[in-house]
């Protein structure tokens, strides 16, 4: 009789236990590595934000009108926020409120900030895309062209502002070329367009660099396949380039929007933060700095409002536009795989 072979003992439970223990060890190591960073971020970012919010609910120190004595600021509730948000413009309309009340100052600064953000981001995205397409091509001297395009972004903003200040002076190059006498740094709308031109010249290379990174990830085989299928240049751009570069494009737009919303140094140096009626180029950041010289608590309320506006815009980009971008990219990858 032949002996029946006995089955070898299964090692699956042992392997599963070992893998589970390894994953647990890796999870603990990840926590140990992340916690110091989270603590540092809480100190560097969390503490100033919480401190500003607490200060925004207090009165600024000053003279008591009833007694004439100097008193420390006490609890003010939402009074500081009401000063900035609820006072009317006095019939001036958005962007043209007289600089009389705090509310007028806030809404004028908000209008100027969003106007600069929308116009500059649209122009920089269009020109940046065009530059990225040029830099992505293979031609002789491409390295020199890339270096020349990136030079304006490498120049410090303060130097850029001074450079354009001389260009836009009354006897500057701009008026000489146009054969005009435009007051670029003092007229209301001329000063705004001066800021837009200078900021577009300065930051377009940044947009081009981020978009170029997305263009270089597109396989050349897709363009060859599109040509074989009879797609023209415009069809290849709309059906291949735009959908595949969209993730990098959305990241570039998000970064640029957040940067434009805190615009300070360029208008502060180029036009002194004023121009025209005194508030034509005054952004929210400039208004916060001006208010700090008069009272920290009211400035804290204004900076908190600005922070909430920027946070809300970033949330909309990341939560809605970012999610759609990821889903679109996954769908496109599945379609290519099929």
Image (cartoon, rainbow, N blue to C red):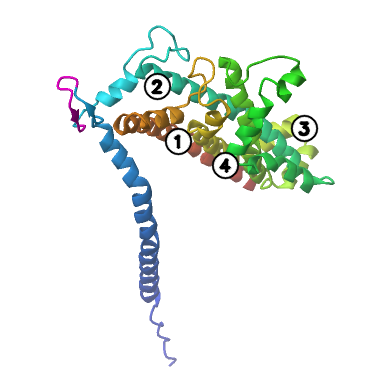
Q: CA distance from mark 2 to mark 3?
A: 47 Å
Counting residues from the N terminus, which is met first, the one under dot 4 or under dot 3?
3
Q: Which residues are magenta?
A: 65-73
Q: Which residue is labeled 3 in the image?
A: 233
Mark 4, secondary structure of its residue: helix
Up-down relation of residue 11 to residue 256 (above or below): below
x and y percentages locating residue 59 in the rendered image: 23, 29
Q: CA distance from mark 2 to mark 4?
A: 40 Å
Q: Residues within 10 Å of mark 3 (few under 14, many from 20)?
A: few
Judging depth in this view, the residue of 222 and 335 nearest the camera is 222
Instruction: Pick the quarter of the image with the N terminus.
Output: bottom left
Judging depth in this view, the residue of 335 and 195 nearest the camera is 195
Q: CA distance from mark 3 to mark 1?
A: 34 Å
Mark 2, secondary structure of its residue: helix
Q: CA distance from mark 1 to mark 2?
A: 21 Å
Q: CA distance from mark 1 to mark 4?
A: 21 Å
x and y percentages locating residue 304 in the rendered image: 35, 33
Residue 29 belongs to magenta span = no
Up-down relation of residue 58 to residue 44 (above or below): above
Q: CA distance from mark 4 to mark 3?
A: 22 Å
Using residue 249 as the reference point, say whether residue 142 is left or right of it. Answer: right
Q: Which mark is residue 329?
A: 4
Residue 66 belongs to magenta span = yes
Counting residues from the N terminus, which is met first, the one under dot 3 or under dot 1?
3
């Amino acid at each position: 009789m032949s002996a029946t072979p006995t089955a070898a003992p299964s090692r699956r439970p042992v392997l599963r236990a070992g893998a589970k223990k390894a994953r647990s060890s890796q999870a603990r190591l990840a926590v140990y590595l992340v916690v110091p960073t989270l603590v540092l971020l809480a100190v560097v970012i969390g503490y100033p934000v919480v401190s500003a919010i607490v200060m925004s609910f207090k009165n600024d120190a000053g003279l008591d009108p009833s007694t004439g004595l100097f008193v420390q600021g006490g609890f003010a509730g939402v009074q500081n926020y009401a000063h900035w948000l609820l006072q009317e413009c006095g019939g001036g309309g958005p962007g043209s409120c007289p600089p009389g009340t705090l509310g007028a100052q806030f809404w004028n600064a908000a209008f100027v900030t969003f106007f600069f953000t929308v116009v500059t981001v649209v122009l920089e995205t269009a020109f940046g895309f065009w530059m990225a397409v040029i830099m992505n091509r293979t031609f002789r001297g491409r390295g020199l062209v890339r270096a020349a395009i990136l030079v304006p972004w490498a120049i410090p903003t303060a130097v850029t502002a001074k450079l354009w200040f001389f260009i836009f002076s009354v006897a500057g190059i701009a008026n000489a070329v146009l054969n005009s006498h435009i007051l670029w740094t003092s007229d209301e709308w001329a000063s705004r367009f001066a800021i837009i031109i200078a900021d577009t010249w300065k930051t377009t290379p940044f947009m081009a660099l981020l978009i170029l990174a997305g263009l270089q990830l597109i396989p050349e085989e897709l363009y060859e396949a599109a040509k074989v299928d009879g797609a023209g240049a415009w069809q290849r751009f709309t059906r291949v380039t735009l959908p595949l570069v969209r993730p990098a494009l959305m990241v570039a737009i998000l970064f640029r929007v957040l940067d434009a919303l805190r615009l300070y140094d360029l208008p502060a140096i180029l036009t002194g933060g004023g121009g025209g009626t005194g508030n034509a180029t005054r952004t929210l950041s400039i208004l916060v700095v001006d208010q700090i010289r008069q009272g920290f608590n009211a400035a804290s309320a204004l900076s908190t409002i600005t922070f909430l506006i920027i946070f809300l815009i970033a949330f909309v980009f990341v939560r809605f536009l970012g999610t759609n971008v990821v889903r679109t990219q996954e769908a496109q990858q599945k379609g290519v795989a099929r």
